[in-house]
Amino acid sequence: MKTVIQLILLLSITALTAQTKSSETLNFLAVGSAAQEGVLLERLERIDAMLEEAVASNKIPGAVALIARNGKIIFHNSYGMANHTENSKMKKDAIFRIASQTKAITSTAVMMLWEEGKFRLDDPISKYIPEFKEAQILATFNAADSSYTTKPAEKQITIRHLITHTSGLGYGVIDSDDRLKKIYAKAGITDLFTTKNIGISENIKKLAKLPLHHEPGEQFTYSEGLDVLGYFIEVISGMPFDQFLRKRIFEPLQMNDTWFYLPQDKHKRLVAVQERKADRWQKYPVTFYDTDYPIKGAKRFFSGGAGLSSTAKDYATFLQMYLNKGKLNGVRLLSRTTVQSIMANQIGPIWADGPKHHGLAFAVVNEHGEGLGGEGSDGTFDWGGYFNTQYFADPKEQIIGILMKQTQGAVDDQTGWKFRQMVFSAVDD
């Protein structure tokens, strides 16, 4: 009898172990029921109608929207056209240039290497990229020829400064200061994306020689800091940046549609960047960049701040890993304690009176922001992208919202704030 009981216990433990292992390898973003996840179906229908109306009234050319709760996709729809010129309808698996949504992925890669003890966040970046050794601040500027003078910075740029946009670096063509725009242009800095035959190492080494807006750590200035960290990842890991992301993040999370440059078999799923001219949507022309960069050109420039393309489902998968405190699909990318640090206020009083603080990968809603309404709970993290994409994830409510569009130029688009506000208004538990 004792032997039988021992056998039953052994079989029970084996079955439990197998069940645990199986559940750890499941894709937690399976399709679920809104009602079962505590979301009102009729309020999701309001969101659907709002997006349909935005397309019908020509406010946007098309979109893909995804909402997940408790690891289940409860809303995933496509609207309008992916490319009006080619009469191509939008599909749920459409691929979008996510631009600055790349930053959170790059930051995650940095923190994965940090967990391996490769560096400290307050190490000077010059320890790993020597060209940054003598930081200089812009002193005077001559508009006639874009010449300038500098003064030595009192502090050195650290990795923490780069990841939180407090380094003093600028952002070239989209910079808020025309002086830095001209200085970056004259130096030939590649700011966002390119089809040209340029690598990130040569670009970052040129950038390192240019003046800063201000003393490192003293202000928030949106910058190319994450591009610097893309090259830093190459230096620390010994791998090309794109390969590091694929092997360490995209393959483990099964983010098979997230790339700097799309494989040939995914080209047709890329949504055109469109602008509205005389009430008609047309493909956005080549300006200081070519919007076809993900499918043409030299394909050598891996922008850590703006270069990736992805789908709503892939990006939701990435966010779900964070809601799961660093783990998804049976793979742990980050420790729960590291995720806590990533979400903490990393810029001190710089945004003291605002509704959010900045962590090590995201903007994070604070108690004041929660009270204002429509932003999510205290702790909701978010960001967006240059071509009109956005995301947010609320750890308290276990909600993810993603709205993907591809537009440039003047548009009367109110779908962004409406979508977010209406998602949280749909909670029913």
Image (spheres, rainbow, N blue to C red):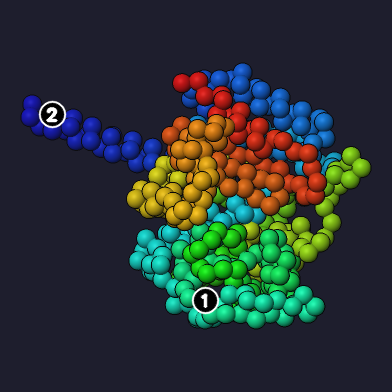
Could you say which quadrant of the image residue 418 lies in?
top right
The answer to the question of whether label 2 and label 1 lie on touching residues, with beta carbons closer than 8 A, is no
Give the residue furthest to the top: 42
Kind of residue sitting beneath label 1? Ala
Kind of residue sitting beneath label 2? Ile
Query: Camera-side residue: 25 or 5?
Result: 25
Give the mark nearest the N terminus, 2 or 1.
2
Residue 404 in the image: state x and y as whole percent.
67, 42
> Is residue 132 in view from this perspective?
no
Could you say which quadrant of the image residue 298 lies in?
bottom right
Give the residue furthest to the right: 278
Under circle 1, the secondary element is loop
**Quadrant of the rendering where the N terminus is positioned:** top left
> Is residue 284 in view from this perspective?
yes
Residue for badge 2: 5
Q: Is residue 120 left or right of residue 164?
A: left
Under circle 2, the secondary element is helix
Residue 153: mark: 1
Q: Is the residue 78 above or below the residue 340 in the image? A: above
